[in-house]
Image: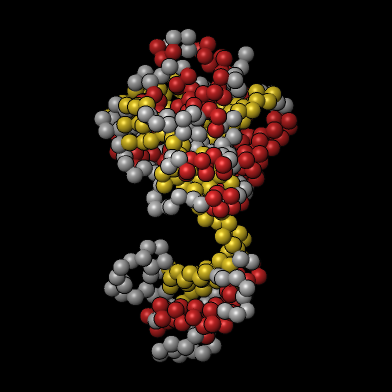
């Protein structure tokens, strides 16, 4: 019998049978699972194990390039830990947003590692794979039907932007995982997915109320981040009808009413509503109660089915090659005149290369220590003692990037400014060469919500026996 079948047998009366134990093993698999906490979590005999593997937080590069954000070595280690743990307990393992961005190349590489581990360790199980790639024609049709809504200030994508995108994905919700569970899969690996869906599908299958189940999922998917102090250790969620309790598997990380309630602000514009493809989670009446110094009980979340199904779309399009010059300055005269210096250097470089380079290029000067992170409206009361200058260039080719940056470096190094004492150079380079080529650059072509009539056709499932 499959792990899913055994799980159903353990809950013959659904939520009335007993509490459901969910173990979140990793907040983003591939960055290193703290093993002692995972072992403690497995000892609690969870009914299923879930892992989120990705995020759009690193920006469009990994989606555009098809590369996995984590190293193969650490990804293989983490996948091995959770796969062995789930198979030893014979419980379902659900993994979402494979390979960081969840497009086909990320999914395929994750599957290669899983199959390799299974073969080497003689593990046998049924595997369900859920794809999240969206055809460009589907997006074009939605745009023409006014079914696309931007997140933020992005305009509707043009046909050229859609066709030029290297990968387009949609975030699947609980529905896709539910269909995968119905195949009796022991292990489910999904492309781009809502973090909550990984942990909501099993409770929904067993008849638990969606409000508390989704709220528990929202909290535990990031493992122990909601604790004091926060961390990445495995987290246990115990769903008891319309309430749940959460507990970090690291005894040094404590869930408190304040720390757990504050997690409602995580990645949310509105702390009282969480929008999912199938509906909305309402948190305005939630109560957080301390069980002891380490655990919290939560109740009061409500679920409302969506009147209109929708999914979030993400797409990335190449914009050229990227490189940087990295330098520091401790000369107070240079720091005082840095804006005038960088403006003059850019003009000089553009005048020099205007007829030499076939393609246009973009230059960005960022002065860290003053306003590199935030564009502060007013200068500091006291000038910084040191600044770090990063010059970024994006151009059609890597050779053009290197050409621009080499010129920028030289003219920034020797630029004349009021009060200059040294003509030999006025910035310091942390290493040589100071020009760093960073590879292809991407931007988001899609960051929109698309209204849909059905979810299932968008997220096909393939099943294989290992």
Task: Farthest residue to the top: give it.
Answer: 12
In the rendered image of this protein, does residue 133 appear above or below residue 409?
A: above
The answer to which of 129 and 360 lies nearer the viewer is: 360
Residue drawn at 68 percent across, 25 percent down:
464
Where is residue 12? Give x, y as percent: 48, 9
Q: Residue 224 vs residue 408: left or right?
A: left
Quarter of the picture containing the C terminus is top right
Where is residue 80? Give x, y as percent: 63, 34
The answer to which of 463 and 10 lies nearer the viewer is: 463
Residue drawn at 33 percent across, 36 percent down:
273
In the rendered image of this protein, does residue 251 appear above or below residue 163?
A: above
Where is residue 383? Give x, y as percent: 34, 75
Q: How is the image coloured?
A: secondary structure
Q: What is the tally of numbered marks visible in this picture?
A: 0
- Residue 137 appearing in the image: yes
The part of the image, by quadrant, that contains residue 15 is top left
- Residue 27 appearing in the image: no
The answer to which of 416 and 257 lies nearer the viewer is: 416
Quarter of the picture containing the N terminus is top right
The part of the image, by quadrant, that contains residue 268 is top left
In the rendered image of this protein, does residue 440 appear above or below residue 426?
A: above
Q: Residue 133 vs residue 143: left or right?
A: right
Task: Farthest residue to the front: give it.
Answer: 144
Residue drawn at 58 percent across, 67 percent down:
395
Where is residue 322? Give x, y as percent: 58, 64
Residue drawn at 64 percent across, 66 percent down:
397
């Amino acid at each position: 019998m499959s792990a899913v079948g055994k799980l159903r047998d353990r809950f013959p009366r659904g939520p009335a049978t007993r509490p459901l134990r969910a173990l979140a093993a990793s907040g983003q698999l591939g960055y290193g699972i703290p093993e002692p906490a995972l072992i403690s979590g497995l000892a609690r005999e969870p009914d299923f194990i879930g892992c989120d593997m990705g995020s759009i937080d690193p920006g469009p590069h990994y989606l555009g390039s098809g590369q996995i954000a984590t190293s193969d070595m650490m990804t293989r280690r983490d996948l091995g830990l959770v796969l062995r743990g789930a198979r030893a307990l014979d419980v379902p393992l659900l993994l979402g947003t494979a390979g960081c961005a969840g497009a086909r190349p990320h999914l395929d590489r994750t599957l290669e590692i899983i199959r390799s581990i299974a073969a080497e360790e003689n593990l046998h199980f049924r595997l369900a794979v859920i794809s999240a790639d969206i055809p460009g024609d589907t997006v074009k049709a939605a745009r023409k039907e006014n079914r696309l809504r931007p997140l933020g200030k992005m305009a509707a994508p043009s046909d050229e932007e859609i066709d030029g995108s290297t990968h387009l994905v949609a975030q699947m919700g609980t529905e896709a995982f539910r269909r995968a569970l119905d195949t009796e899969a022991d292990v489910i690996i999904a492309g781009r997915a809502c973090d909550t869906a990984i942990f909501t599908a099993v409770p929904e299958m067993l008849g638990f109320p969606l409000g508390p189940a989704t709220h528990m999922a929202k909290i535990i998917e990031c493992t122990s981040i909601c604790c004091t102090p926060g961390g990445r250790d495995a987290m246990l969620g115990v769903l008891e009808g319309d309430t749940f309790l959460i507990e970090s598997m690291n005894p040094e990380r404590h869930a408190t009413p304040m720390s757990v309630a504050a997690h409602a602000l995580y990645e949310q514009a509105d702390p009282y509503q969480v929008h999912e493809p199938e509906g909305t989670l309402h948190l305005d009446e939630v109560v957080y109660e301390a069980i002891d110094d380490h655990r919290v009980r939560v109740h009061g979340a409500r679920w409302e089915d969506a009147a209109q199904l929708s999914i979030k779309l993400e797409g990335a399009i190449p914009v050229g090659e990227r490189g940087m010059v990295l330098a520091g300055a401790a000369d107070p005269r240079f720091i005082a005149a840095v804006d005038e210096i960088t403006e003059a250097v850019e003009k000089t470089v553009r005048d020099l290369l205007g007829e030499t380079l076939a393609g246009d290029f973009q230059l960005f000067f960022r002065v860290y220590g003053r306003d590199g992170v935030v564009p502060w409206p007013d200068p500091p009361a006291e000038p910084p003692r040191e600044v770090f200058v990063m010059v970024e260039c994006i151009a059609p080719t890597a050779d053009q990037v290197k050409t621009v940056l080499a010129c920028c470096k030289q003219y920034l190094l020797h630029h004349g400014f009021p009060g200059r004492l040294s003509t030999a150079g006025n910035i310091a380079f942390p290493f040589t060469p100071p020009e760093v080529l960073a590879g292809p650059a991407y931007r988001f072509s899609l960051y929109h919500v698309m209204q849909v009539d059905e979810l299932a056709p968008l997220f096909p499932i393939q099943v294989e026996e290992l």
